[in-house]
Amino acid sequence: MDVSGFLDGYYSYNANDPSESANGKANDLYNFNDKTNQWRLSAAKLTLNHDPGKLGARVDMIYGRTNRLVNTSNQLYLVEQAYLSTKPPKAKGFEMDLGKWVTSAGAEVIESKDNWNYSRSLLFAWAIPYYHFGIRTSMPVSKTETVGVQLVNGWNNITNDVGGPTVGLTSAYVKPKYTWNANFYTGPANYSPQHGYRNLFDTTILLTPNTKFNAYINYDIGLNKDSIYHGLGDDKTNKWQGVAFAAHEQISSKFAGAARIEVFDDSDGYATGTSQTVKEFTGTGEYHWPLGLLARAEYRHDWSDTPFFHKGASRLVDSQSTFTVGLVAIFAPKR
């Protein structure tokens, strides 16, 4: 059983200086490092993992601002992931997991240390789910492609209290210079009187031309029919979509830089609660200290076509600028 984990803390400065009474003193449209003009613990994580053969298991315990936002329904509140796995030696790479796991959708992950930027993208925060509960399978179908099928209890749910079972289809096509991932989730998503359906298509193309430079393009589109959010019972369909571009350069063994720009169209207001098109640019510098300490400094600017961002105690403006310093202490088994 491998034991690993990390501590992730940050200080974020927001030039708008939103107040506690305005929006809880937070960076609007952020997740995980949302609390601003203060030091905060983003996450403390402990992972226990036994790689699957005939039987494997993984448990990720997480505490801090991150788990409060991921597990808003208070189901397995301190558990990011917990699942049993099997990968039979004679099954030609087939693997099956049962339990709770983070979603296959998206170009980024919950852990900041595994992303290029410290803050998560608009698409990660608003276009896709955080996790699923159910069963998932994956199987190599060629030397370059692995496909999978999932049957889960919707989005961000342990118990199936809303809608019905959701089906997920996944594909990963891996070549030396690029990787193409595609994910599709579909299933009933609203309370039973509405009989609504929610669909999500997510795709990412990761470019890896050499060992120092990488880039990706991420696109998401979602449709939700008869949304309980708007209290509708007719054929109203809410749509959200967005695209993100990011690049990462490993300048030296200790220094790296990354940039991300994206556009998120939420014209029906389903995802963010406001009808808007919002954009953001993020620039991140990274330094690896000895003994597993990762430091990042980041500037980010978000802007919308409508006054959405809180300023001071009562004003709403169409943009916000933030500067964040993040520190992550990592421990992992040595092989």
Image: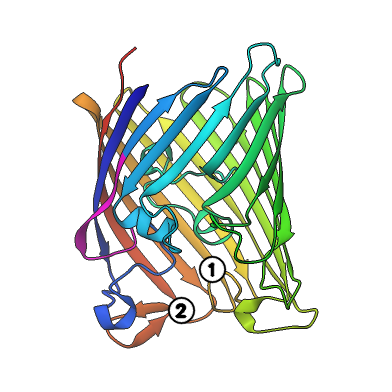
Looking at the picture, how far across and down is residue 127, in whole percent? Answer: 58, 59
Q: Main secondary structure of the magenta part?
A: strand
For badge 1, the amino acid type reads Val
What secondary structure is marked by label 1?
strand
Highlighted range, magenta: 33-45
Q: Nearer the viewer, residue 226 or 25?
A: 226
Q: Is residue 11 magenta?
A: no
For badge 2, the amino acid type reads Phe
Q: Is residue 37 magenta?
A: yes
Tell me, yes or no, if residue 135 can be seen here. yes
Q: Nearer the viewer, residue 31 or 233?
A: 233
Residue at (49%, 58%) from the top-left corner? 125
Crowding near pointer 2: few (<14 within 10 Å), some, many (20+)? many
Residue extending farthest to the right is: 235
What secondary structure is marked by label 2?
loop
Which callout, 1 or 2, points at the residue further toward the start of the chain? 1
Quadrant where the C terminus is found in the figure:
top left
The residue tagged 2 is 308
The residue tagged 1 is 278
**160 up-or-down from 327: above or below:** below
Image quadrant where residue 69 sits: bottom left
- Contact, CB < 8 Å: mark 1 with mark 2? yes
Residue at (60%, 65%) from the top-left corner? 161
Residue extending farthest to the bottom is: 314
Residue at (36%, 45%) from the top-left corner? 284
**89 up-or-down from 87: above or below:** above
Tell me, yes or no, if residue 268 can be seen here. no
- Residue 136 is left or right of residue 114, and the answer is right
Quadrant where the N terminus is found in the figure:
top left
Looking at the picture, how far across and down is residue 98, in whole percent? Answer: 58, 37
Looking at the picture, how far across and down is residue 60, in whole percent? Answer: 39, 39
